[in-house]
Amino acid sequence: MLDKYIYGAQGILLVYDITNGQSFENLEDWYNVVKKVNEESETQPFVALVGNKIDLEHIRTVKADKHQRFCQENNFSSHFVSAKTGDSVFLCFQRIAADILGIKLNKAELEQSQRVVKADIVNYSQEPVTRTINPPRSSMCAVQ
């Protein structure tokens, strides 16, 4: 049934979970299906390799260099996204569509798609703050 969906496709995304090594190992089988379905076709589809769940970088099992090597060996475009947070999802689709259409994205177009803001988590002391009812007046300002 899969062959009905991918036959004649202009673009195919092979998506795997960066925290699941087996999902990466299965890519070879999925790509063989793509090649078999399109072996008699005049044009081959554009194939992109997408590593998902980059929000879970701390438990990553598939290293980025392994991903990049697979892309180079098979002439895939390379992408990393988080479907959960939306990080780089729009940029991934924008880049793939541009590649299929032969359009070169400029720097502003690439940067506008990267809206994720990262910040450090700060743990403040949980001790109660004592306050005086009528603090002395001062020309200084203090934040507690």
Image: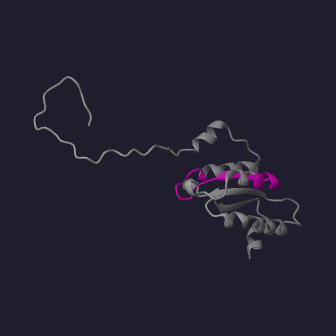
Q: From this viewpoint, is residue 96 visible?
A: no
95 or 58, nearer to the observer:
58
- Give x and y (percent) for residue 9: 76, 63
Q: Write the start and end of the magenta stretch as one range.
A: 69-89
- Looking at the image, is 2 positioned above or below residue 123? below
Q: Residue at x 55, y 54 (%)?
A: 58
- Looking at the image, is 133 positioned above or below residue 95? above
Q: From this viewpoint, is residue 97 visible?
A: yes
The answer to whether residue 51 is left or right of residue 118 is right
- Give x and y (percent) for residue 74: 81, 56
The answer to whether residue 41 is left or right of residue 52 is right
| Residue 71 belongs to the span the image colors magenta | yes
| Residue 70 belongs to the span the image colors magenta | yes
- Give x and y (percent) for residue 110: 63, 42
Q: Which residue is drawn at 74% across and 44% down?
A: 103
* Number of marks drawn: 0
Q: Which residue lies furthest to the bottom in this view?
A: 1
- Give x and y (percent) for residue 46: 77, 56
